[in-house]
Every structure is written in structure tokens, then in C-alpha cells.
Amino acid sequence: MRLAYAITTALVAGASVATLALQSPVTAQTDTALFAASAPRAGAPGSFADLVEKLQPAVVNIATKERVQVSANPFAGTPLAEMFGNQLGQGGEKPITREAQSLGSGFIISSDGYIVTNNHVISGHAGQSGVNSKVSSITVILPDRREFTAKLIGKDPTSDLAVLKIDATGLPFVRFGDSTKARVGDWVVAIGQPLGLQGTVTAGIISAIHRNVDGGPNSRFIQTDAAINQGNSGGPMFDLNGNVIGINSQIETPNGGNVGLGFAIPSEVAAPIINTLKGGAAVRRGYLGVQIQQLDEGIADSLGLKKNQGELVASVVPGGAAARAGIRQGDVIAKVNNVDVTPDQTLSFIVAGLPVNARVPIEVIRNGQHQTLVATLAERPSEEKLAAIGRGNRGGGLGDDGAAPGQQASKASLGLALQSLTPEINQQLGVPEATRGVVVVNVDPESDAATKGLQRGDIIVSVNQLPVTAPAQVSAAVASARASGRSNVLLSVQRGNTPAQYVAVKLVSDK
């Protein structure tokens, strides 16, 4: 299965191409005036026709035009690119610029022409890897076929939301509802233009709420089985009272088509962002400055904790809010601002919804003991800066030496042959000379370590949060875990210059 981010239909030089885009939602100050007072009513009508007749006039099509640079080599992106490109005399030519058109959906939220859509709908190919493009125009097409050139009022890539404005008055519009009252099993209606088919209406139920599909700071989607396809991006999801409780944004699909797994940004998250963008301001989010991992069964067992209760700090950004508060790598963050950290209330979601510069209590579990620290939140950096945090180059490999004497205990317990790091090995791996740990020189292919992805050249920095620099220390930590009745040990594993990540590895049975 692969997640098809965003669902915009793109037409490039006459060919149909699926453009798959971005992310999730946020929180700013909620404008309660946007929320309708009534909750969705129970049951379903014999027909959705009366409801759709009222709502459809406020749902619009959005078309963008952009200039996209493509390679002059017709074999670009294939193994034949260099060979045939040079033979055709095209190897050194400048890229060709072509016009591309993308289609998506949106909805009117005020009679004077403010419109909500997804950011990726109006951003085209911009920001996609290896693509150089710029959107030159945004056109809004009303259901009565009138067309308007739209002005971009504001966009927020992190939440994948944008606000447009057209020069018109007296327009039909819809309001946001309160998605916190939505329940699994409630009926919903989606309207948009999948595959360019204007005004398409589909219906289904809410399949799940608080669905975390991309790990973003505000990944809190409504899942639905209402048919959503490419081109539905930015369109509204309505409850049976005609209120917008979600903005259709993503699908999960093995083939690019609808398989009944659609995701919408809930109004509880979208409405405050829309208010902020509509007012011409930028969305600001709290930021703690940690990289985290979920407490799966293995990691939780290795720490003696319950799974899905808290999140593990994989690394701490130097000088960031977490570092200043005293949060360390290996801490489990259990609560933020007195809110439990769970799969439904993730650390990223809670922190992103808090004000910048807020002082918040952070409850951590360190070496089995609970303690509370106070952090002053920073402002979340741009997505580009965040992508650069933790980016590193993969180092080289080891030689072909087998397991050295003294490694057998680790190999028997973990399925790993280990060796102490030396300046020469560090140089081979392309890591700083000061790097400390033990290096994996062999992995038993039938071990849990192999299943978890450990490979030759990985550096184990710690075992059960105790630093290790020799295989004997690893063996001692494993023996201690066995004596405590644990079936897993927690390894902090570094690959090349990338930040270390925690991996729980099952111990090999000693029976």
C-alpha cells in the first residue's frame, strides 16, 4: 500500500498525470463563529438530493497553470538517458519549458468570494523533487461556469491549506461545522471534481477519527469510505446538516484510484488556520525540538513500559527548547501540558497546538522514574529547515573481516557480530573520529535484528540506554535484560551520519 498524498489531477503537454502531494493540520485560536451550533443528526435521509441541491453551488473547481522545466533528453529518468541523450546531441541542452495545468476542488466560505482549498492544489509541481516550476495563474470555476482569476491570500504547507479570493459578491457559501462531535459511523457527503468531472457527489460514512497517516505535527485526519479520487483535493466533506466537517486531502491506494480509504483534514484543525490565513497572518506553531519514536511493543517491553503510552525521544536538537529544558535522548515523554501523549494525542499534535513561547510542563520517564520538566516552546521552523535537521550522508562500509574473538555472546543473544569502533573503522564508515559505539560486522539473517533492518556497518551507540563501546558491554546489558525478565533490548542505532534511532530487538532464545 502506498499513501497517495493529495489528489490533484494534472495535465502536462496533453498527457494525464497524477500529482500526489502533502500533509496534515494545525491549531491556532478558534473562531467559534465559524462553527454551526447544531450537531449532525442521527440516521440518513431517503435521499441526499435536497442537501446536495443546497450545497453544490458553493463547491468550485480550481485550475492552475504553471511553467514546468523538463529535460530535453527524451530518455531522462531512465538508464538510457546518458547513452541516447549524448548520441542525439541533447546531453548538454537546456531543459525545455512546457505549460502544465492542474485541477482540484475548493469551497466558498463567504459571500464576497473567500475560498478554501488544499495548498498542493494551488502549488502545482512546485516543491516536488527534481521539478522546477512556478504557478502562473489560478482560476476558479463556479458551478454556473463563470470563471474568475483568484488571488492567493495565504497558504500553509504544513497543514496543506490555502485561502483564495475572487472578485465577486452575493455568492453562495458554506460554513464549518464542529468535527469534534463527529462519530465513527456518521454519514458524510463529499463534493468535488475527481478526474476533472465537475460537481461529482459521493457519500459514505466516517470510518475512523484522529487517524495519523503521515506523522506530521497535526496529523489528525477523518477517515471515510466516501469515494475520493484525484481531483477531489480541497473539496468539502459535509455532515447531514450541511456543515463542512472536513477538507478532503489524501487517499491511501495501491494503484492511484479509490479503494475506500480517504482522509480529510477535520474542521476543528482547519478552521483556526483558515481564520489566520484569511486575516493575512502566518500560522505559528509551538516546537519542542525533538525527534520521536512510537512505543511499539518491543520498545515498550525493553523499557518495562506499556506500549502506546508516551513517545520515545530519539534525538534532541542542540540548543532547542527540549535541550534547554533538560530533556535527553532516551527519555519517554508521557505528558505535555498535563495532556497524556497517546496515538490519538501525539506529541507533535499537542505541541503544535500550543502558543510559541508558552511555558509548559513536560512529564518524562527516565530510567523508570517519572519527573516533570518545564520547557519554553520555540516556533516551529519551516518544512525546508526541518527537512535539513538530521539529514546526513551514508558512510562507507566495513572490510570483509569476520567476527573477532569476544563477539560470540552478542551474536548468540542478538544475532549480531560486533566490533569496537576504531579511528580506522570510523574513517571507513565516514563518521567523525570521535564517534563512540560498537559496529555491526555481521547479522544473522534469521534473527529479529535482521527483520528490524539492522545491517553491516550500523553503529550501536547504546543498549537499554547505557552507552557501549565494546561487545562485552553489549553482552552485559543483554544479560541484565534477561535477568529482569525482558524479551527485548533497546538499541540506539546510528547509520552513517544520520541521527541515531531506537530499535527494539528480541533476544535469541537461550533454550
Image (spheres, rainbow, N blue to C red):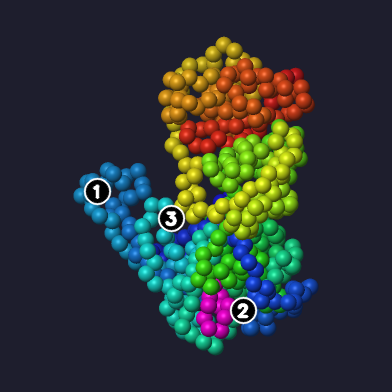
Camera-nearest residue between 378 and 62 = 378
Q: Is 113 part of what is drawn in magenta?
A: yes
Q: Position of residue 253 (x, y in %)?
A: 58, 56
Q: Earlier in the sequence, mark 2 or mark 3?
A: 3
Residue at 73% in and 52% down: 339
Q: Which residue is mark 2?
A: 174
Residue 123 in view here: yes
Separation of marks 2 and 1 at Cα, in angstroms:
53 Å
Q: Amino acid at mark 2?
A: Val
Task: Name the element at disc 1.
Answer: loop
Separation of marks 2 and 3 at Cα, in angstroms:
32 Å
Camera-nearest residue between 17 and 414 = 414
Q: Earlier in the sequence, mark 2 or mark 1?
A: 1
Separation of marks 3 and 1 at Cα, in angstroms:
23 Å
Figure quadrant of residue 367:
top right
Q: Which residue is mark 1?
A: 91
In contact (CB < 8 Å): disc 2 and disc 3: no
Q: Earlier in the sequence, mark 3 or mark 1?
A: 1
Q: Is disc 3 surrounded by few (<14), some (14 to 19) or many (20+) residues within 10 Å?
A: some
Q: Amino acid at mark 1?
A: Gly
Q: Is disc 2 surrounded by few (<14), some (14 to 19) or many (20+) residues within 10 Å?
A: many
Q: Which residues are magenta?
A: 104-116
Residue at 54% in and 88% down: 170
Of the two numbered discs 3 and 1 in the rendering, the one whose residue sits closer to the viewer: 3
The residue sitting at the bottom extreme is 170
On screen, residue 137 above or below 409: below
Camera-nearest residue between 326 and 388 = 326
Q: Is residue 308 left or right of residue 146?
A: right
